[in-house]
Amino acid sequence: MKRPASNRAPVLYAISATCAAIGVLLWVRGRTAPPPMRYADYLEADSYTPSVWRVWSPAMPQERLGWYLIAAGLVLAVATLLASARRG
């Protein structure tokens, strides 16, 4: 018996394209934008207390995160292509 075609490939390609698009946007923003204000400056202005949980790490610049997301998108696209070629 032949199994029905899987609908996972379009979903994985969409995830891969989204990941790569966000990576490109972050890379471009990291290359062109002026350095952002520190979050602590906003806290001092509004007299809030800082949170222990950090959302964004200053150790990871936007350019590098963009490159990682582009690479992840490409790896996912190639893995999907290989898996669908092997299956079909």
Image (spheres, rainbow, N blue to C red):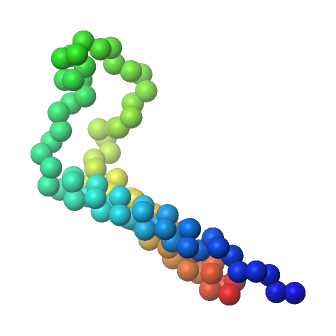
Rendered location of residue 58, percent (x, y): 29, 38
Q: Residue at x 68, y 87 (%)?
A: 88
Q: Quadrant of residue 28?
A: bottom left
Side of 57 where 84 appears, left or right = right
Q: Quadrant of residue 60?
A: top left
How many marks are shown on the rendered structure? 0
Compared to residue 52, the image places residue 25 above or below, namely below
Rendered location of residue 16, percent (x, y): 47, 67
Compared to residue 47, the image places residue 37 above or below, namely below
Farthest residue, direction right: 1
Q: Is residue 75 visible?
A: no
Side of 24 where 31 appears, left or right = left
The quadrant the N terminus occupies is: bottom right
Compared to residue 44, the image places residue 7 above or below, namely below
Q: Residue at x 22, y 16 (%)?
A: 46
Side of 41 where 6 appears, left or right = right
Foreground pick, 12 / 35: 12
Compared to residue 27, the image places residue 4 above or below, namely below
